Amino acid sequence: MSQCQALLLSSSNCHGYSMLEFAKEEICNLLEKNNIEDLLFVPYAQKNYDEYTKKIKEVIDPWGFSVTGLHTYAEPVEAVYDAQAIFIGGGNTFMLLNTLYSQNLVSVIRERVLEGKLVYIGSSAGTNVATKSIHTTNDMPIIYPPSFEAIGLVPFNINPHYIDKSDNETHKGETRDQRIGEYMEMPHAKSVLGLKEGSMLHVDGGSLVLKGVAGAVLFQKGGKKTEYSAGDNVSFLLEE
Amino acid sequence: MSQCQALLLSSSNCHGYSMLEFAKEEICNLLEKNNIEDLLFVPYAQKNYDEYTKKIKEVIDPWGFSVTGLHTYAEPVEAVYDAQAIFIGGGNTFMLLNTLYSQNLVSVIRERVLEGKLVYIGSSAGTNVATKSIHTTNDMPIIYPPSFEAIGLVPFNINPHYIDKSDNETHKGETRDQRIGEYMEMPHAKSVLGLKEGSMLHVDGGSLVLKGVAGAVLFQKGGKKTEYSAGDNVSFLLEE
Ligand SMILES: [Ca+2]
Ligand SMILES: [Ca+2]
């Protein structure tokens, strides 16, 4: 059984809350339970690493932790190896995954987290890269990564910022469900957990539980679509 | 000077019109001007090739042309080589480009169109693959293509189904302009022409003119954003 401890957030922002506020209790509990005081922040999904790290630091340091940016270390692989917890923030999933590959970080993060040596927190793009692949990101493919396969802490896919409404009634672009449906028809498709903004998935070894202030929708092969609420146990997804 | 003749549609569907109706006059004019009676349809962006081809055939055959599906030919490269006009339909851009590469069609289409031997009509995903690259598709990356570089009939990018409204006021996912903005910050970024639904770009050798019942928005390096209307000449984009 994997020793993985992870918190995969749909997004950092949620209507009616300040940044990360809806997830504060879960993040604090997870870090405190593991006696962790330092959090290594990975700002690769956005362009300005210093500014992005500062923004996250201003939110999380007051909770009693110390945030540093991975980009400030000369040896990122070593910094990850030495860390007890990382937080990979949102932005563009393609840029994030491309940089994780170019810095040789994909396998070291996977190994350390699965061994139980590194606690993983991800949000939005940082949640996409934690899963099997980035096939179900909402982001534009602004750069070509060496693979769409990702860190693979869980054997299925997540669609963050999940929303089931269409853009508007007169626009003919696909809805989110149509987009996910296109993926589900591929031979290589895995189940897709659509996390609504405000929801998150707590991975604790073999246990998967939905947390937060919103629910999730699970898409499975054959067109099956199931609604879940915060508090629901979805550990069966590890059996995929 | 390239002999390219192409019509790049934002989409096949436009609010208030039946399928392709808003583009009927332009499509008919382009084919008739070149004395073309047969149209080779490329259904690779969707899953069911027969059904998709039938749908397009039911719309276009009554206009006085004969549509056949490229998937019905044993040798797709030869079929393209022998054709006078192709229409590449919409669906998923990643699946479309991946199939064009696996069938060795990218370079033969490019060469025949640029030589003036093949008229190109594209819609949505079929418009994305006609441009420099698919970096600005709206589609989900459901399959990993060998490259994001595409047919390259024009040296810039297009965002089809362009819309400048956000999904809704409480959703925190990025707007279309933010997504395109992320691309524009990349060192490899080209200008992006956002074609609103109902608009199309007519490429006639060195002339680029907007057509249809809606306009377009041009995104350029440095944050410049310019609105254009049907009838406007944007040939300067070929100088990029
Ligand atoms: Ca994003
Ligand atoms: Ca599409």
Image (tube, coloured by chain):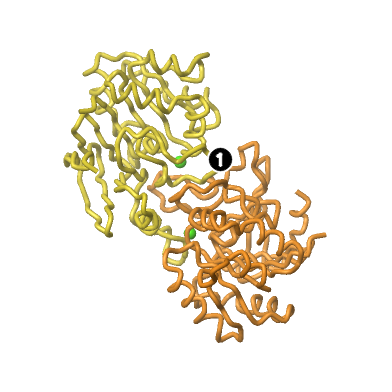
Chain colours: A yellow, B orange
The reply, left or right, for residue B46 in relation to residue B73 is left
Determine whether the residue tagged by mark 1 lies in a helix, strand or loop.
loop
- Residue extending furthest toward the right: B1
Q: Position of residue B19 (x, y in %)?
A: 50, 75
- Which quadrant: the N terminus of chain A? top left
- Residue extending furthest toward the front: B74
Q: Position of residue A63 (x, y in %)?
A: 31, 19
* Amino acid type of the residue tagged 1 in the rendering: Ile
- Assign ligand 1 to one image quadrant: top left
Task: Report which quarter residue A85 is drawn in.
Answer: top left
Going 50% across and 63% down the picture, which residue do you hit?
Answer: B44
The reply, left or right, for residue B83 in relation to residue B173 is right
Tell me the subunit letter for badge 1.
A
The reply, left or right, for residue A157 in relation to residue B28 is left
Going 51% across and 64% down the picture, which residue do you hit?
Answer: B90
Quick check: can you spot residue B66?
A: yes
Going 39% across and 41% down the picture, which residue do you hit?
Answer: A133
Q: What crowding class fits label 1: few (fewer than 14 Cα within 10 Å), some (14-19), or many (20 or more)?
A: many
> Mark 1 sits on what residue?
A143
Q: Position of residue B200 (x, y in %)?
A: 63, 66
Whether A207 is drawn above or below A177: the answer is above
Q: Position of residue A86 (x, y in %)?
A: 37, 22
Whether B123 is drawn above or below A236: the answer is below
Going 26% across and 22% down the picture, which residue do you hit?
Answer: A28
Quick check: can you spot residue A12?
A: no
- Taking depth in this image into account, of B46 and B20 the one nearest to the observer is B46
